[in-house]
Amino acid sequence: MDNRTITVLYGKHPKPMVKELMQVLEVEKEIPSKDTLIGLKPNLVVAKPHETGATTSPEMVAGVIEYLQEHGFTNIIILEGSWVGDSTPRAFRTCGYTEISKRYNVPLYDCQREKASFHDAGDGMRIEVVDLAMKVGYLINMPVLKGHCQTSMTCALKNMKGILTNQEKRKFHTQGLHKPIAYLGKIRKGDLILVDGMCGDLDFEEGGNPIPMNRMLAGTDPVLMDAYAAALMGYELDEVPYIGIAERIGVGSADLSTATIRELNQATDTIKAMPSRRAKQLAQYVEADQACSACYGSLIHALARMSDHGTLRKIPGKIHIGQGYKGKTMDGIGIGACTAGLSCSLKNGCPPSGKAILEFLENLR
């Protein structure tokens, strides 16, 4: 599997999507043997359903298990530890994982209760990691692409905090999060990263502002994956310091210019419901007509960055987006290839990234 490639699949149905991704990547050829202990590490930071934008889709996890079992792999576990103050067993129940465990005979392990040991990450960093996470022979990291109130965003690298003890999680916060998150990547990172980009929260790790983006990402380099995720959300790399730190200490490469972004299909599904809270406020700047959720989600992320920068007032009018503008010639601001006929349009990218949209909008005259 090429660690310089990120594979993207668009759609609305997590289980068949993740199975298609795994088939394209031929994941079964990467696992050492049929007896290998395979660990699935979702994001169950809080006991909230996937639809809130906080946690990994249970259907996505079910799809991974089905694919593995269909290819003869039965030694599978799910391991996770919710954030300090919440109960992992409650998260397992609320998020549908208890039912998955029973249906597929896959045990659940609460990392808040597992034994752990300290490991040297270099440069004086010692991190206490759950022993079970180190024993797993093939680890599939399954983060949610979403915002975070302290680190701007969270994806592959930060999702590994779930394999720490509660005491170590507290210590990470006293250390400013970014440095220890990066160094954790030197101790343990996933052999495969499957990112749930279906409906991640816009701002907060605990959900509440779900943005439909209806995509999944697959790769093996967590630094590259996080660099790509940052671009999708409209962030510069220096706005998410742990990505650059992880690159500097050799966890992976953040250089998207040398990466291959392989899209298996085109985004065609349209948004149906307006997200809540802040996302709904940002939508007042948008005139959507049959907008694909992937494109629309990138736009909302870009508008959120403009709100952070105090530059929303620079937008001279409504932003048009969606397939309903295809073939139309008119004055106005457009985002995406479908708005190529508008007088001022970002035509490149289908869908464009949040970063590209942000740069386009902030440079309007």
Image: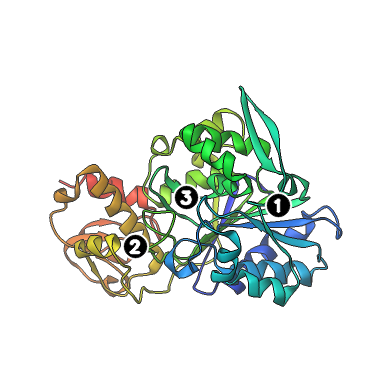
Say if residue 129 shows up in the picture.
yes
Q: Between disc 1 and disc 3, whose residue precedes?
A: 1
Distance (Cα) linking label 3 and label 2: 21 Å
Residue 65 appears at what percent x and percent y?
70, 68
Q: Residue at x 63, y 55 (%)?
A: 80
Residue 161 appears at what percent x and percent y?
57, 46
Question: Image quarter for residue 316?
Answer: bottom left
The residue that mark 2 highlights is 337
Closest to the observer, 230 or 177 = 177
Say if residue 254 shows up in the picture.
no
Distance (Cα) linking label 1 and label 3: 20 Å
The residue that mark 3 highlights is 229
Q: Amino acid at mark 3?
A: Ala
Labelled pair 1, 2 in contact (Cβ < 8 Å): no
Q: Is residue 222 above or below residue 119?
A: below
Q: Between disc 3 and disc 2, whose residue precedes?
A: 3
Q: Amino acid at mark 1?
A: Leu
Closest to the observer, 135 or 359 = 135
Judged by depth in the image, the label closer to the viewer, 1 or 2, is 1
Please tell me whether mark 2 sits on a helix, a strand or a loop.
helix
Q: Amino acid at mark 2?
A: Ala
